[in-house]
Image (spheres, rainbow, N blue to C red):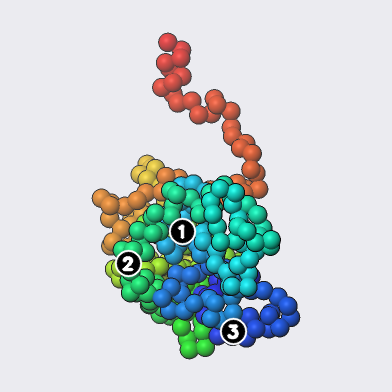
Amino acid sequence: MITYPSTNGVFEENIREVCELIHQNGGQVYLDGANMNAQVGLCRPGDYGSDVSHLNLHKTFCIPHGGGGPGMGPIGVKQHLAPFLPSHPVVSLKSENTMSSLGTISAAPWGSSAILPISWAYIKMMGAKGLMHATEVAILNANYMAKRLENHYKILFRGSRGFVAHEFIVDLRPFKKTANIEAVDVAKRLQDYGFHAPTMSWPVAGTLMIEPTESEDKAELDRFCDALISIRQEIADIEEGRMDLRVNPLKMSPHSLACISASNWDRPYSRESAAFPLPFVKPETKFWPTISRIDDIYGDQHLVCTCPPMEVYESPFEEKRASS
């Protein structure tokens, strides 16, 4: 199986040679369509050697992730694999009468009727030119953001001409040594700027994988870049000794409303810098994190809830009412 463009955010230039090498050795190539939104209207998987390809409707063709029901996505095959496609006992399919068919694998051979109309409507409204434009803008947005951030962070992978595909990877690993800062600290701090963090530590540990898509305008892209650039300055403050290695806006993030409005504030940075680090983060529009830092690793390792007894959650009002 091959993902193209790769999850590293690069159009692999030797994709045809790789597919041909696999074919020469008796293999078949399955193309992961996860990044099809960087290809629609510009290239066709079959042209560079794919024998089978699925399309992720949840990203390329507009449905919500998961679709609110069973996941689905069309799977396309080359002609020599068509006889092996599934059949169905009720709905007539082209592969129904072939001896090589895999048989029935789904009660609904065409997928989910709750999902497909959304993608169909999106494709009809966009048209061929619109779909290609969406692909071009997705690639343009990623390259714009990578260019804005390259003087502040290392962009981990690029093509031979210095460009990325529709996504790119920001390397945060050096900050562990220079400032005791890890990817999770940057991800949590982004909440204080009003952003949910992009994909963290995948496909490379200690990184952020940023995929802006075609949906956001330039103002929003700039806002996100400004947040990351500001965070880089906060890291520099730690590196240069202006901020403590353990008690700083990144290590203590995110800052909830309860934290900011508490009577006591004993941190070596201001409440304002914690909650409103840039001018676009305004009190009247800020999205407040509901809680502060939690132990993610502990939660991942303890799947069964180990909560305190109910008495711990009782408020003084409830105790007074119970006694009366």
- Disc 2 marks which residue? 126
Question: Which residue sits at x=74%, y=81%?
Answer: 25
Residue pushed farthest left? 284
What amino acid type is highlighted by mark number 2? Met
- Disc 3 marks which residue? 16
**Which numbered tag is attached to residue 217?**
none
What amino acid type is highlighted by mark number 3? Arg
In this figure, what is the number of numbered marks?
Answer: 3
Quarter holding the N terminus is bottom right
Crowd band around label 2 with a 10 angstrom C-alpha radius: few (<14), some (14–19), many (20+): some
Residue 182 x/y as whole percent: 55, 64
- Judged from the image, the secondary structure of the residue bearing numbered disc 3 is helix
- Judged from the image, the secondary structure of the residue bearing numbered disc 2 is helix
- Disc 1 marks which residue? 58
Snapshot quadrant of residue 214 = bottom left
What amino acid type is highlighted by mark number 1? His
Crowd band around label 3 with a 10 angstrom C-alpha radius: few (<14), some (14–19), many (20+): some
Instruction: Answer with mark 3 or mark 2, whichever residue precedes in sequence.
Output: 3
In this view, the residue in front, 94 or 137, is: 94
